[in-house]
Image: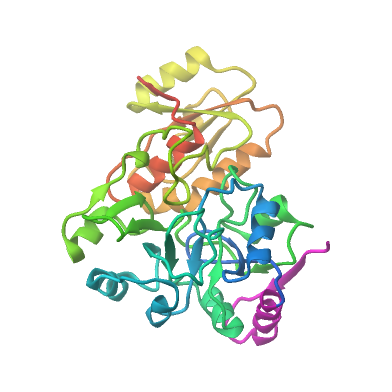
């Protein structure tokens, strides 16, 4: 299969928007940009197209997909028993990086929901994603457009690195603004439960609807037999080929640890400006006090390390876990398969 690259940099790129929509209407796969990461989109109501997503990514069959719609008005077509909190959250955060999990209608294939009776929905903020959804007239299931388990793609180049020849088209709209996947909040639980941290923080959600619970899987590994209620909960994710070890502690003991344990097959993932202090190759993923920058650059930094020959181990500086930092910390925990060293 030849993968076509469609450049869409503004709303005037109508020809490529319509071309992407036509591929999707015909059961094809199109990697599309969102404000979070690039997603591998297919018609959410077409089981054969959904199966192609799982095959292209090598994705576990019990891992649910998020369905992207173009407005709150579409929510009732796919979900039922919708609580008033859904509208409140949509008014506050849609379009944007918040996914709501709700009881699903029968029209949503069980393959989309990983066999569950719920569906995950969001309205993306990226103009190209919404334009393609509108032009296709379809709800689009779209997990991250990468090989399952590898760092998520935040540029079209990342998508092509993983999926060239496996998908029909890739939309190139430049780099993603947020850089980590959406927050996933289940409204099928009482109180609502945060299943995955992302661009909308727990504090922001609480400011709109009050109390929420944070699922234990956000900071802890789930058992292999556990039911997966959201993408990114159960499996090792976001990881380069090298072994990642997350190091908790201040800079001085971190340096001591690296000097004592590093070799010529080691790299470091650090904060901006710390590279000259490291005895091995170091890749920064943002400023120590800028979780927004950390989120935006994390996956690109992990992919940069992937392209370095001979690197077998990565020692990663641990971010703060408050606010948006919780999403960055969650991604690094999973990249490290929960291997954490405190110094």
Q: Nearer the viewer, residue 136 or 152?
A: 136
Q: Is residue 193 left or right of residue 17?
A: left
Q: Is residue 12 above or below residue 59?
A: below
Q: Residue 51: where, in percent of width, then height?
A: 66, 58
Q: Nearer the viewer, residue 266 or 145?
A: 145
What residue is drawn where x is 52% and y is 49%? Answer: 63
Q: Quadrant of the N terminus?
A: bottom right
Q: Is residue 273 visible in the rendered structure shown here?
A: no
The residue sitting at the front extreme is 106
Locate residue 292: give its quadrant: bottom left
Is 33 situated left or right of 287 in this image?
A: right
Q: Check the picture and name the quadrant holding the C terminus.
A: top left
Could you tell me which residue is drawn at 47 percent across and 37 percent down? 334
- State the image coordinates of residue 229 (x, y, percent, origin top left): 42, 50
Please, which residue is most extreme toward the right here? 1
Give the tally of numbered discs. 0
| Residue 335 coordinates in the image, percent (x, y) | 50, 36
Is 114 one of the magenta-colored residues? no
Q: Is residue 21 left or right of residue 227?
A: right
Rendered image coloring scheme: rainbow
Q: Quadrant of residue 333?
A: top left
Question: Measured along the vertical axis of the image, is residue 120 above or below residue 14?
Answer: above
Depth order, front residue of 297/68: 68
Q: Which residues are magenta?
A: 1-25
- Taking the spot 23% from the left edge, 73% from the top edge, the residue there is 84
Which residue is more in the foreground, 256 or 91? Answer: 91
């Amino acid at each position: 299969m030849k993968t076509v690259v469609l450049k869409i940099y503004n709303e005037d790129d109508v020809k490529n928007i319509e071309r992407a929509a036509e591929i999707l209407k015909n059961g094809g796969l199109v990697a599309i940009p969102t404000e979070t990461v690039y997603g591998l989109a297919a018609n959410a109501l077409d089981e054969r197209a959904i199966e192609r997503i799982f095959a292209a990514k090598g994705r576990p069959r019990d891992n649910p997909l998020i369905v992207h719609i173009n407005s709150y008005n579409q929510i009732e077509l796919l979900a039922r028993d919708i609580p008033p909190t859904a509208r409140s959250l949509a008014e506050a955060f849609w379009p944007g990086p918040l996914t709501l999990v709700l009881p699903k209608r029968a029209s949503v294939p069980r393959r989309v929901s990983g066999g569950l009776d719920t569906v995950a929905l969001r309205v993306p903020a990226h103009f190209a994603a919404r334009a393609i959804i509108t032009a296709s007239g379809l709800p689009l299931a779209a997990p991250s457009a990468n090989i399952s388990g590898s760092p998520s793609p935040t540029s079209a180049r990342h998508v092509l690195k993983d999926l060239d020849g496996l998908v029909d088209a890739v939309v190139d709209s430049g780099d993603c603004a947020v850089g980590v996947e959406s927050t996933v909040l289940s409204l099928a639980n009482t109180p609502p439960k945060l299943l995955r941290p992302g661009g909308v923080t727990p504090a922001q959600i609480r400011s709109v609807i009050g109390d929420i619970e944070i699922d234990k899987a956000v900071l802890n590994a789930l058992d292999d037999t556990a039911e997966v209620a959201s993408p990114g909960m159960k499996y090792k994710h976001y990881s380069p080929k090298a072994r990642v070890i997350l190091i908790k502690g201040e800079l001085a003991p971190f340096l001591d640890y690296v000097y004592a344990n590093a070799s010529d097959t080691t790299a470091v993932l650090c904060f901006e400006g710390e590279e000259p202090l490291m005895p091995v190759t170091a890749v920064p993923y943002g400023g120590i006090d800028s979780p927004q920058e950390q989120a935006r650059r994390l996956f690109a930094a992990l992919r940069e390390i992937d392209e370095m020959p001979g690197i077998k181990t990565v020692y990663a500086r641990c971010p703060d876990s408050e606010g948006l930092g919780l999403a960055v910390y969650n991604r690094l925990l999973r990249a490290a398969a929960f291997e954490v060293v405190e110094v």
